[in-house]
Image (cartoon, grey):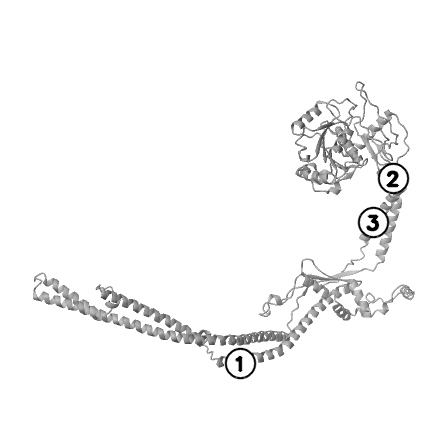
Amino acid sequence: MSGVQSTAADIDVDLRRLFGSLARNWLRIAIVAVAVATLAFVLAWLATPQYKAETRLLIETRESVFTRPDGNSEADRPILDEEGVTSQVEVIASSDILKRVAQKLDLARLPEFDPTAHTSAVDRLLIIAGLKSDPGEIPAEERVLKSMREKLNVYRVETSRVIVIEFSSQDPKLAAEIPNAIANAYIAFQGNAKQESNSAATDWLAPEIADLSKRVKDAEGKVAAYRAQSDLLIGQNNSILATQQLSEMSSELSRVRASRASAEATAAGVRKALDGGGSLDALPEVLSSTLIQRLRERQVQLKSDIADLSTSLLDNHPRIRALRSQLVDLDQQIRNEAQKVLKGLVTEAQTAQARENQLIADLNKLKAESARAGEEQVELNALEREANTQRQLLESYMTRYREAASRTDRNYLPVDARVFSPAVAPTEAYFPKTIPIVAAAFVGSLLIMAIVTLLQELFSGRAMRPAPGRRLEPVEEVAMPVAQPDAAREDLPPVLPARPRRDEPLPPEPSLSPEAVAREWESEREVRFEPAAPAPRKLERTVSRLGEIDIEKAAEKLIAGGAARAIFVSPEGDEAAASSILVAREVADSGLRVLLLDLTASGAASLPMLDSGLFQGITNLLSSQSQFSDVIHADHYSDCHVIPVGTADPVRAMRAADRLPIIMQSLTTAYDLVVVECGPADAQGIRRLVGDATEVFVSMLEPDDAVADAAVKLIESGYPDLTLVTPVGYEPPPLPGRRSAA
């Protein structure tokens, strides 16, 4: 074993002694605080009182609904949004308004606003020496404006259209007069601006109206001349006469065609009835004839007489025969009358046909005339459109001119702002506030003196004390005793022999006895593993009983086999995690890039490598709280890298356990070998960690039933090639230029 080194700090801050320095130096602190408070009181008492008053303006539309022009749209109204109100703040604080107020109140005569009015002898000496600029070189108006700006504060109240004009002065009456005067000057300025805008509008509209009147007259004359020249007379509904006639003739043609079709259909029906010898009673046109109706009545009368005589006379009776002869004549007369009706219908159809032909001819002529009128109507529409545009523009100009002229004559130009809270003379000065100033000076001086006292005590070294725990002197390497198989076991510490820190020089190493070395092991274990671990187990070299191999052979197997992942299962708990640490360091010493991933609940694998459990690790990575660069740390005693358990909530981290295969794949891409310490895990627990070129190891300290049962279960679960490895009896080789630490 090599020398021993303490991982605790050499010195620590004695907080009791550090803060006790405040009690030891309380008199000095109190004197300084009282002196500073007294000085603040004197300065506040000698300071000139300052009074502050404010005037509040409300930016709103003052136009009444009864006086608002009818053509006033939303776009014509003043902009009262946040930017618009802020712009009015800048207008109020403009030099033009401040100059008007300064001239009105004659502020240049007051020493408060013109420092040249009363220049002290000290100021004159400083000016002569060139240590101070001569205020007399600046114009008096600029000096007054500069003083006003220093005392003036104009701001907009958040989420409102209220503007506050705040002014401070040595004179309370003047502190109220100036903001009121500024508000009145702003309102007058806005009124003058509207007056100027209104006058400019009337001056511009008058010649424009005269010019537009002439142009409207010329445009309407062109329309009338073109209409007369093109014979585009207007009929009903403001339509061209030719177009209106075309519409009426089209309607007449449709009517004539319908009449002709009706006459032809009726004639065809009558002709069919006459040619087929059918009854004419079903034809309305035949029945509508007066003569046919009388003949039908006579026919009915004869049939009635024949029926009456047939009861008393025979059929060959002369009277009956005469009546029947009259009945036949009546039928012939009815058919003759029907022929006449047919001829009338045919004549009516022919007349309708002739009328239709005439209408078609006239319609064609009107179509040509309407087409010509349509072409000329396009030009006429353009002229009318121009005339209408000019007329509408003229009417709008005339309306605006009358409105502007009436407002100018009546001097009615409401400003979009009003004073709703004028300033009043304050009765109490806002500066200086003696009590708050003295209290602040007293408390501030107390804090500053307390900090100065603490720093003095800290830098003097009087507040330092040795750190808890004894710092061990380095010892030279000695051989650990090896027990024979039948010899009694010696009590050995369960901690692994840590590798030397790379950043520590090699000091002279005095020799210690094996008993002292064992005591140093036990003491260092109590320092490094806080809270204290269970009582150390008794380890000894034993003869291989389950076919286990030592650390060197396990490392050779990984190197020779080209393994990318090494999964270590420790059924015996945290103490058996030494196998994964030693194998990782052994492989790293061969020149390969090795990373150890600690998945134990207690951090048993990473704690001996980092000497602390406060580093970010795999739980932070699974919880998406850190990146790879934040969780990968260097082993303090070898070239190996390590990802500790971490500081995040394990329950939250296990919800993202499905990301472990992705993390393992990324790590195997960056490193030659990834060693994973799983603790007492089973086959289901290491399922997400196994990949290509993976070796599974079972760490053991003693060949007991727990190790055998764990190995059998892993073999039965699909890992028949697992290897048993033991850290018992392994001693790391001494490295030149390094010092071992337990």
The quadrant of the image that shows the C terminus is top right
Q: Is residue 234 left or right of residue 344?
A: right
In this rendering, the count of numbered labels is 3
Marks 1 and 3, how far apart at CA: 91 Å
Marks 1 and 2, how far apart at CA: 109 Å
Q: Nearer the viewer, residue 606 or 335?
A: 335
Marks 2 and 3, how far apart at CA: 24 Å
Residue at image x 23%, y 71%? 340
Residue at image x 60%, y 65%? 74
Task: Name which of mark 1 and mark 2 comes first in the sequence.
Answer: 1
Picture quarter containing residue 621? Answer: top right
User: What is the three-letter code of the residue carrying label 3?
Assistant: Gly
User: What is the three-letter code of the residue carrying label 1?
Assistant: Gly
Above or below, 525 relative to 193: above
User: What is the three-letter code of the residue carrying label 2?
Assistant: Ala
**Mark toward the viewer: 1 or 2:** 1
Residue 463 has which mark? 2
Q: Determine if residue 141 is in view.
A: yes
Which residue is under mark 1? 221
Secondary element at tag 2: loop
Secondary element at tag 3: helix
Which residue is under mark 3? 444
Q: Nearer the viewer, residue 503 or 240?
A: 503
Q: Determine if residue 13 is in view.
A: no
Horizontal and vertical percent position of residue 574: 74, 29
